[in-house]
Image (cartoon, rainbow, N blue to C red):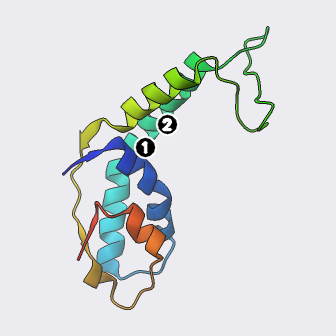
Amino acid sequence: MIIKNRQIYDSAAALQDLINIDLPIAISFKLSRITKEIDPIIISIEESRKKLIDKYAQKDEDGGFVKSTDNPDSVTLLDPAGFQKDLLELLEIEVEVKVDTISLSEFGHIKVKPVTLLALDWLIIE
């Protein structure tokens, strides 16, 4: 299956939500295999994102990041448009993953939040 980095990155939290639910063994097995397949991709995306922050962030005299005055949890970017362009390019890269899809019927009577299903629309079929 070929999907974009964005789909993988955006589905990380949803996969964690599902992994923490008591699911039938078949789905649990599929989810563990899926997680093992996409975790290295998520790590690579995050490493690349951090490199972009390092490239575009304003740094102080000691080489540390200058915190944003609007949000102390974020950094000040010297070229926000350049950062955004490069980040979007990273998230639009297509990758091939070898995963089995999960049928919605496999969940049976297990309640799954719609936001979780939406984040995993590339993985879950009707």
The residue nearer to you, when weighing 21 against 77, is 77
Amino acid tagged 1: Ile
Q: Give the x, y percent position of residue 31.
A: 35, 65
Q: Is residue 74 visible?
A: yes
Location of mark 2 (residue): 46
Residue most extreme to the bottom = 109
Is 107 situated above or below 65?
A: below
Asked whether the residues under the numbered discs 1 and 2 touch, taking CB atoms below 8 Å apart as contact, a structural biologist would say: yes
The residue nearer to you, when weighing 114 against 61, is 114
Q: Give the x, y percent position of residue 99.
A: 23, 57
Q: Give the x, y percent position of residue 43.
A: 45, 39
Is 59 situated above or below 83?
A: above
Q: Is residue 18 visible?
A: no
Q: Which residue lies at the image location 69% right of the left edge and 17% below the top edge?
A: 58
Relative placement, left or right, of 66 versus 9 is: right
What is the number of the mark on residue 67? Answer: none
Q: Which residue lies at the image location 46% right of the left edge and 63% below the top edge?
A: 14
Instruction: Assess disc 2: are there few (<14), some (14-19) or many (≥20) residues with their C-alpha within 10 Å of its C-alpha.
Output: few
Q: Give the x, y percent position of residue 59.
A: 72, 15
Residue most extreme to the left = 1
Q: In which quadrant is the C terminus drawn?
A: bottom left
Q: Which residue lies at the image location 31% right of the left edge and 60% below the top edge?
A: 33
Location of mark 1 (residue): 42
Q: Secondary structure at mark 1?
A: helix
